[in-house]
Image (cartoon, rainbow, N blue to C red):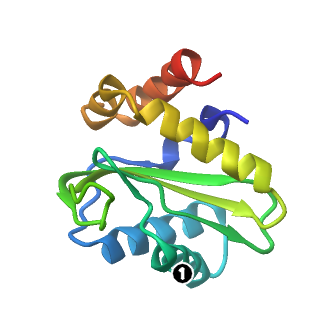
Amino acid sequence: MKISEILAKNAILLNLNASTKEDALNQMAQYCSSLYDIKPAEQIKSKVLEREAEMSTGIGFGIAIPHARIDGLDKLYMVAATVSQGIDFEAMDDEPVHLLFLLLSPTNTATDHAETLSALSAMLAHVEMRSQLLNAPDEDAFLKTITNGEDKYVR
C-alpha cells in the first residue's frame, strides 16, 4: 500500500501551531477524527498516547511517526503535519520534531501497518526528502514530494 494512497491532500497540516507533544497529538487526533469521521476523537488520542508511553515514536532527524491500531477502523488513515518551531517529542536523538505523520490502522492489518511505517522511515531517511517536506509551500507540493519519494526510495 502506497503512502500517497493513504495520505490525502486535506490531511496535511502545514505549520501546526503546537508547543508540546501532547498538544500536537491532540490537534492531529481531533483533526483526523473530524476529517475521517472517526469517533470518538479521544479514543485516537488515548491509543496514540498509550503507544507513546511504551516508546517514543520520535525516530530522530526531526521526525515522529505516532501510530496506533484501533478497533472498528475499516482501513488505514494518515494525517501529516509540519511544526516549524519544533517540539520536544522525546526522540531517540533528543532533537526537536518538525515532521509528524499520524498513522491509524485497524487492529487486523498488521502487515499494512508495518509496511507503511517502513516505507515512511525509508523515505524520511533522506535529508532532501525531509527538507522538501519542511519547505513545501502548500499541501500539493508536500503530497508531490511524498509521491516522488515513494517512487525513488520505496521498493
Can you give x and y, in whole percent of width and height, for residue 95 in the image?
Answer: 21, 55
Q: Residue at left 80%, top 56%?
A: 109
Q: How many marks?
A: 1
Position of the N terminus by quadrant: top right
Can you give x and y, in whole percent of width and height, for residue 106 in the image?
Answer: 77, 63
Question: Is 100 situated above or below 152?
Answer: below
Helix, strand or loop for disc 1: helix
Q: Residue at left 23%, top 60%?
A: 94
Question: Is 112 situated above or below 123?
Answer: below
Residue beneath disc 1: 50
- The quadrant where residue 33 appears: bottom right
Can you give x and y, in whole percent of width and height, for residue 83 in the image?
Answer: 25, 53
- 76 vs 63, nearest the viewer: 63
- The quadrant where residue 42 appears: bottom right
| Amino acid type indicated by mark 1 | Glu
- The quadrant where residue 108 appears: bottom right
In the displayed structure image, the side of residue 8 where residue 1 appears, left or right? right
Disc 1 crowd rating (10 Å Cα; few below 14, some 14-19, many 20+) is few
Can you give x and y, in whole percent of width and height, for residue 40 in the image?
Answer: 63, 82
Q: Residue at left 44%, top 61%?
A: 57
- 7 vs 60, nearest the viewer: 60
Q: Residue at left 57%, top 60%?
A: 35
Residue lying at the far top of the rendered structure: 152
In the displayed structure image, the side of residue 34 where residue 71 appears, left or right? right
Position of the C terminus by quadrant: top right
